[in-house]
Amino acid sequence: MRNLSKFVNPLIQAGITAARKDGKTFIYSLRDAHTLLHTHNRHTPSEEGDYAGHVELPKWHVNLPKEGNMLGRVAIDDWKLGEFLYLPLRKYAQKGILVSGASGSGKTSAAKVIVEELVEEGIPALVFDYTQQWQRLLEKNTNEQMLDRYAEFGMRRSPKGFKGRVLNSAPQLDSLLGSAGATIVDLSDIYDSAERVNKVARMLDQILEYFQFQEDSEDLRLMIVVEEAHLWTSKDLPKDAVRFLDSAARLLRKKGVGVMLISQKISDFDPAMRSAMNISIVFRTKYEGDLRAVARMLGTDMSLTIPKLPVGYSSFHLADIGDSFVLAWRPTYSEP
């Protein structure tokens, strides 16, 4: 495990072209108020027709867990809200989570829901943050539209911020594991994408070195969140970069460390890496490469549904329980 740094060193010399986010942000309304989790998304006005009319969602047959962390509600036809999804994250998150979707589709908010639930249970989180969005995890939600939706998810109208700290450098691992909140590494002052990837790779390498001396554990001890994971798959980086990320996720899970990757695209990841992530969460996208990957992973019906998903809705697949389904994510307690 220790010498995985050989995969890190090439990153120092590599160049990477920053991913450009094109498209404009529009404010739109949906026919049914219950479908509105957020009011912004990167879609053109012509796409709003996708939300109109009767919508049938893919059929699924899964016995959902009856207890655990409440993540949201299963969506049924016409985007209506069905039964609550309770998932014991202590059991499942350690095996890896992959979250993907277009910019503005709700993937970071969903990731925050997962982190909120874990931090609430005393499991520390380490977040590599490029946009300063995660710093709002420490502040309570003041978005009135989201607060109005708490009741739909059985939530009390009691928003809150969570314990945590913001750093500009790697944390001391002993203090990290002993903390009771989120440690957010602010990388927003690093504009070059190669430097961002390299800095995160160095920190992951330090974490791997630390845990090689720790006993294997089936208990979740730490959740690591890697934003913009698609940067690791850039053609401008050596293939060893994404291989290192894959190796880190696989090796750390044996030590009780879960890794959550948040990416705009999943098709750039090797199929073996995608299948190794126990939980796959796909938000709205119209990228054909991703839709083909979803068709192979989750079936044609789900791949046809993905482009139509409202903001805050995703497909949800947990390898341990079978079929995928559409999930409406609960609002965050913290500032979105």
Image (spheres, rainbow, N blue to C red):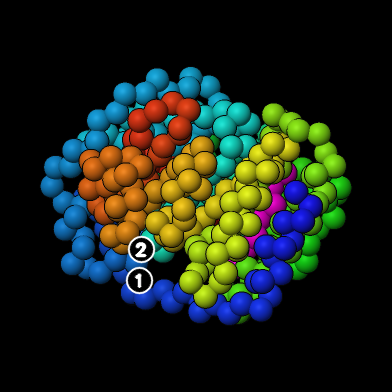
* Disc nearer the start of the sequence (2/1): 1
Is residue 165 visible from the viewing direction of this image? no
**Is disc 2 placed on a helix, strand or loop?**
strand
**Mark 2 highlights which residue?**
41
**Is disc 1 placed on a helix, strand or loop?**
loop
The crowd level at tag 2 (other Cα within 10 Å; few <14, some 14-19, many 20+) is many
- Above or below, comparing residue 41 to residue 252 in the picture: below
Is residue 69 visible from the viewing direction of this image? yes
Can residue 153 be found in the magenta stretch? no
Can you tell which quarter of the image residue 75 is in? Answer: top left
Front position in the image: 232 or 103 = 232
Q: Main secondary structure of the magenta part?
A: strand
Q: Residue at x 29, y 45 (%)?
A: 295
Q: Which residues are magenta?
A: 124-130
Front position in the image: 66 or 304 = 304
Tell me where residue 184 appears, x and y as whole percent.
70, 58
Q: Amino acid at mark 1?
A: Thr
Q: Amino acid at mark 2?
A: Asn
Give the distance between the C-alpha atoms of the residues marked 2 and 1, in whole angstroms. Answer: 6 Å
The crowd level at tag 1 (other Cα within 10 Å; few <14, some 14-19, many 20+) is some
Can you tell which quarter of the image residue 149 is in? Answer: top left
- Above or below, comparing residue 275 to residue 59 in the picture: below
Q: Residue at x 22, y 48 (%)?
A: 304
Left or right: 16 with respect to 121? Answer: left
Q: Residue at x 59, y 51 (%)?
A: 246
Tell me where residue 141 appears, x and y as whole percent.
55, 52
Label annotation for residue 304? none
Label annotation for residue 25? 1
Tag 2–tag 1 contact (CB < 8 Å): yes
- Above or below, comparing residue 185 to residue 250 in the picture: below
